[in-house]
Amino acid sequence: MMKRQTLVMLLFGCAGLWSMPAAPAIDCSVDSNDLIFSAYDASTGNKDSTGRATFSCHNTQSPTTINYDIAVRTANGDSYQNRWLNRGSASDKLNYNVYKTSARNNIWGYGPLRKSGSMPIEEDASKTFTLYGRIFGGQNVGVGSYEDTITVIISLKN
């Protein structure tokens, strides 16, 4: 029987810590920092940045290995392939995306674009993931602050 627990973390304006039981003997939490881009200039090409998501687990019984999936869902855009940052209520949008690698050639999404792995836990263990962001160059938009909220979903499986 597979037990599944989902931990959710919001980026771009709200970082937090949530703790929920992943299994009777394992307690896990998520921590993050924001993915913040510096000033954008359409004439200078792509603008890159990084953020991180860390999940930590505490095991109160015998050593085990947990399996996990990590997905990145978007608040704006019609899919993970078309994410954008909004400028308040204005119609200006900056297209961007989030990637699994520093080469920024592997979009981090959900479904088949999630990241999977495993982590042994004797007593305490944690795993940190880097989120690689990119605003695409050549977008002529108004001056102002642009933001989006993305959701990182960590599903633990046993």
Image (cartoon, grey):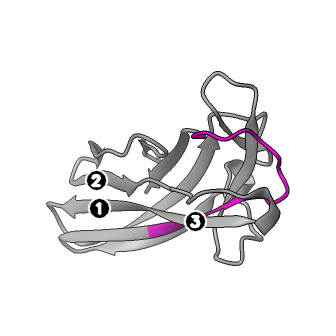
Mark found first going from the N terminus, 3 or 1: 3
- Taking the image as shown, residue 97 lies to the left or right of residue 60, namely right
Q: Which residue is nearer to you in this view: 45 or 51?
A: 45
Q: Earlier in the sequence, mark 3 or mark 2?
A: 2
Q: On screen, 131 above or below 155?
A: below
In the rendered structure, does residue 137 fall within the stretch colored magenta?
A: yes
Mark 2 secondary-structure assignment? strand
The mark nearer the N terminus, 1 or 2, is 2
Who's the residue at 77% across and 71% down the image?
A: 105
Q: Are the residues at dot 3 and dot 2 in contact (C-beta closer than 8 Å)?
A: no
What segment is highlighted magenta in the picture? 129-147
Q: Which residue is mark 2?
A: 28
Disc 3 vs disc 1: which is toward the camera? 3
Q: Write down the residue under mark 3.
A: 49
Amino acid carrying label 3: it is: Ser
28 sits to left or right of 89: left
| Residue at x 69% of width, y 24% of height | 90
Judged from the image, the secondary structure of the residue bearing numbered disc 1 is: strand
Q: CA distance from mark 3 to mark 2?
A: 27 Å
Is there CB contact under 8 Å for labels 1 and 2? Answer: yes
Q: What residue sits right under mark 1 in the picture?
A: 56
> Label 1, label 2: how many angstroms apart (C-alpha)?
5 Å
Depth order, front residue of 115/87: 87
Q: Quadrant of residue 45?
A: bottom right
Q: Which mark is residue 150?
A: none
Residue 88 lies within the magenta run:
no
Instruction: Kindly identify the amino acid type of the residue bearing the numbered disc 2.
Output: Cys
Q: CA distance from mark 3 to mark 1?
A: 24 Å
Query: Who's the residue at 67% across and 58% down the image?
Result: 108
Residue 146 rendering spot, x and y as whole percentages:
60, 40
Local packing at callout 1 (Cα closer than 10 Å; few below 14, some 14-19, many 20+) is some
